[in-house]
Image (spheres, helix red, strand yellow):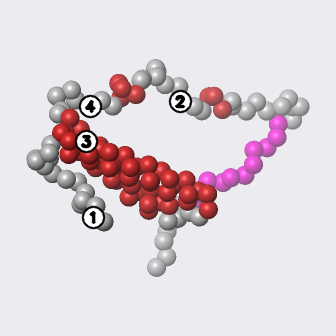
Amino acid sequence: MKKDTPSLPDQTPPQESESKEPAVLAQPQEYVRKPRRTLPFNEIFSVRTDVDTATLLTHACETLAALNMMTANIADDFTGSQRSRLLAIRQLSIMTEMLVNRAVENLDPVNLVPRTTAPVVH
């Protein structure tokens, strides 16, 4: 099956003018959109003040678990020092996830907050 493609405009190079003046090119600054003002990070993203600590820790744990899986998947695509750096980031996320899980357990020892990961059995 043949696809109809629109014809591209003629891309012939512009003809040089007969004057000997150098061409003035646009500066890179002209292409960059200038922001109206720079917003601090806490004005762009915020956490509601009425959320309890156990819920915050549970969401932090889920976010760290997602980071752990993403770094594991990305690390499979690399070799050498790049892979080692990604696996180090993964290890840090796992350790932080363990700390957050322990904080959730300390806050809620009867497990009223559902666990996001299976317990580690050795």
Looking at the image, tell me whether mark 2 or mark 1 is earlier in sequence order: 2
74 drawn magenta: no
Q: Mark 4 points at which residue?
A: 47
Q: What element carries label 4?
A: loop
Instruction: Give whichever of 81, 32 is nearer the camera.
Output: 81
Rendering coords of residue 31 (x, y %): 60, 32
Q: Name the residue under label 2.
A: 33
Tag of residue 103: 3
Q: Nearer the viewer, mark 1 or mark 4?
A: 1
Q: Which amino acid does label 1 sit on?
A: Val
Tell whether label 1 touches label 3 (CB within 8 Å).
Answer: no
Whole-Å distance between the Cαs marked 1 and 4? 34 Å
Looking at the image, tell me whether mark 3 or mark 1 is earlier in sequence order: 3
Q: Name the residue under label 1.
A: 121
Q: Nearer the viewer, mark 4 or mark 3?
A: 3
Viewed as shown, does residue 18 lie left or right of 36? right
Task: For label 3, count other residues whose C-alpha is less than 10 Å away and answer few (under 14), some (14-19) or many (20+).
Answer: some
Depicted 99 relative to depicted 42: above or below:
below
Q: Is residue 59 visible?
A: no
Tell whether label 2 touches label 4 (CB within 8 Å).
Answer: no
Viewed as shown, does residue 78 lie left or right of 23? left
Q: Which amino acid does label 2 sit on?
A: Arg
Q: Which of marks 4 and 2 is in front?
A: 4
